[in-house]
Image (cartoon, rainbow, N blue to C red):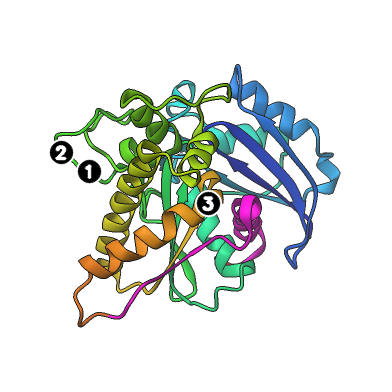
Amino acid sequence: MTVLAIDIGGTKFAAALAEPDGTLRARCEVPVGGDPSAVLHTLLDRFPADAVGAVGIGSAGPLDLGAGTVSPVNIPAWRGFPLVAEVEGRLPGRPVRLAGDAQCMALGEWWRGGTGHDSLLGVVVSTGIGGGLVLDGRPYFGPAGNAGFLGHVVVDPTGDPCGCGATGCLETIASGPSMVRRALARGWAPGSVPPDARALADAARAGDPLALAVFAEAAAALGAVIADAATLLDLRHTVIGGGLAAAADLLLDPIRRTLTARRPATLSPVTVSATALRRDAGLYGAAALAVLPT
């Protein structure tokens, strides 16, 4: 059965047809821009209904799996958006399964990324920060679908306000936009290039002390939250995905150092790696929702 896999993030929507073995084809991607509901329907229009047997969706959250709704922090227009009903309306009769985008990333890495681990934590570091869990070979979503929502774990109670309404969340320190904002506030000058996370990473690689400091702080915050999650759930493997996985050379070693410093010596070490599936990890996970008996 061919399925439609959809990956919904804060700045882009992606979709692809997927075969039962995980082969992706007819992949497309569109920026969110304007009305995200219109963008969703534009994306669905690219796939003929008779080619789709089922649908798997990974979406930024929070989610309410029972209601089939999403409330992405970085898409304010979608508070309580009935995503499942919207897709079912366009593809009647097709089963539709929903999970968080980071949960899909973790599931995709477990299914097609060659990790060799039955349990892992997936962390998406991009416009926002999300987390997903595979435990003993099965995805763990939680009652409402928000298990692993690491971006909104508070790491600095006196820190910056977060779009979720809390203060000092991990996302205010380690997401791409937050890192850029923090660097600019300290006087970082990107020159003629756009002031985005890619430019900040390039500056760090070139030795810019402000950029290096911001990356070090982000990695320390990520490492602290990963260490706590690993201790709580007895996890031994973490995969980092999302747009900032491209800056793995700047993030992974500092994350590992933080893990070593924070983990009790009597517990098993935690490995940290960048996604093997890169930008398609979430699509593979969304496909797995529809293909596998999860």
Residue 146's spot in the image, x, y percent? Answer: 38, 49
Residue 66's spot in the image, x, y percent? Answer: 43, 45
Of the two numbered discs 3 and 2 in the rendering, the one whose residue sits closer to the viewer: 3
- Relative to 163, is 160 on the left or the right? left
**Residue at mark 3:** 245
Residue 157 seen from this side: yes
Look at the picture and state if 49 lies above or below 160.
below
Element type at marker 2?
Answer: loop
Bin the neighbour count of mark 3 within 10 Å (Cα to Cα): few under 14, some 14-19, many 20 and up. Answer: many
**Residue at mark 2:** 157
Among the two numbered marks 3 and 2 on one chain, the one whose residue lies closer to the N terminus: 2
Mark 1–mark 2 contact, CB under 8 Å? yes
How far apart, in angstroms, are the residues tagged by discs 1 and 3?
A: 22 Å
Magenta extent = 268-292
Q: At label 3, which amino acid type do we have? A: Ala
Mark 1–mark 3 contact, CB under 8 Å? no
Among the two numbered marks 1 and 3 on one chain, the one whose residue lies closer to the N terminus: 1
How far apart, in angstroms, are the residues tagged by discs 3 and 2?
A: 27 Å
For the point 45% across and 43% down, the residue is 204
Bin the neighbour count of mark 1 within 10 Å (Cα to Cα): few under 14, some 14-19, many 20 and up. Answer: some
| Residue 222: in magenta span | no
**Residue at mark 1:** 154
Q: Nearer the viewer, residue 4 or 216?
A: 216
Q: Nearer the viewer, residue 61 or 234?
A: 234
Bin the neighbour count of mark 2 within 10 Å (Cα to Cα): few under 14, some 14-19, many 20 and up. Answer: few
Q: At label 2, which amino acid type do we have? A: Pro
Element type at marker 3?
Answer: helix
Of the two numbered discs 1 and 3 in the rendering, the one whose residue sits closer to the viewer: 3
For the point 40% across and 38% down, the residue is 211
